[in-house]
Amino acid sequence: MKHTQEDRTLALAGVFQAAKLVEDIARTGQVSGAAMESCLETLFKFDSASVGNVYGGIAELSTGLKTLIDQMSSDSDKKNMDITRYVISLLHLEKKLSKNKPMLDKMSKGLENTQNQMEYFSLTHENVLANLAGLYQDTISTLMPRIIVQGEQNYLSQQSNANKIRALLLAGIRSAVLWRQCGGNKLQFLFGRKSYLNTSKELLAQI
């Protein structure tokens, strides 16, 4: 299947959305439940007919698209260096993950177990979030360099927030996998800013 720039932009917006929500929790202790749920749902969607369907529609990625525009625009006042750092780290770690079959198998099994758990609990239930956070710790968190989340210690020290952050980082990895599958790569990320910006604006206009 041939993927388009729109596909790559949606997947990259998924990475930016996860990074933005991590930043929100770390700095404010608050997060949009709907945006977080759309991120986490991608962990269990591997047979969708299109990239947009992975996220439940373009509207579910509005946070990610807006964040992508802010971070890739020439307006330095809108940029958040922590979000950029998280995105670059997620793309880098996904590339390492793609070469580690035992870890990929472990993640697949862990997600399958979590999906079974969701027969009894909602996606954002604390038990499900704890399970996803544990899977992140056992897999992605063992790869170097580890993602260090910056923020307010009183928020970061709360276990519920730590679980949400790790679950969202796992979802960020999922979007990074999708981005690479759609033809995304490092050079394109570095030098294709204008194309990503224009496509993001076009997608937002459809919402």
Image: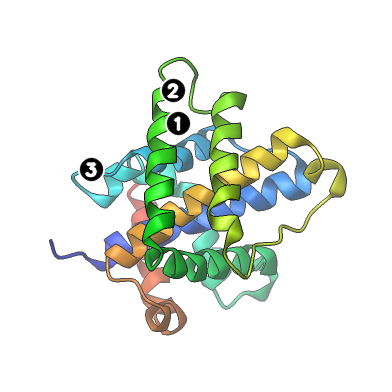
Instruction: Give whichever of 73, 188 is nearer the camera.
Output: 188
Quarter of the picture holding the N terminus: bottom left
Provide the residue designation for mark 1. Answer: 114
Secondary structure of residue under mark 2: loop
Looking at the image, residue 32 sits to the left or right of residue 120; the answer is right
Q: Residue furthest front?
A: 102
Provide the residue designation for mark 3. Answer: 48
| Dots 1, 2 in contact, CB < 8 A | yes
Secondary structure of residue under mark 3: loop
Please state the horizontal and vertical placement of residue 103, each as a whole percent of the image.
44, 55
Secondary structure of residue under mark 1: helix
Q: Is residue 139 above or below residue 88?
A: above
- Give the CA separation, mark 3 to mark 1: 19 Å
| Dots 3, 1 in contact, CB < 8 A | no
Instruction: Give whichever of 93, 67 is nearer the camera.
Output: 93
Q: Earlier in the sequence, mark 3 or mark 2?
A: 3
- Give the CA separation, mark 1 to mark 2: 6 Å
Residue at x 57%, y 49% (from the top left corner): 138
Asked if one can make out residue 100 in the rendered structure from this viewpoint, the answer is yes
Give the label on residue 166, or none. none
Give the label on residue 118, or none. 2
Asked if one can make out residue 65 in the rendered structure from this viewpoint, the answer is no
Q: Amino acid at mark 2?
A: Met
Instruction: Give whichever of 69, 128 is nearer the camera.
Output: 128
Residue at x 43%, y 77% (from the top left corner): 189
Looking at the image, residue 206 sits to the left or right of residue 83; the answer is left
Please state the horizontal and vertical placement of residue 71, each as a whole percent of the image.
57, 68
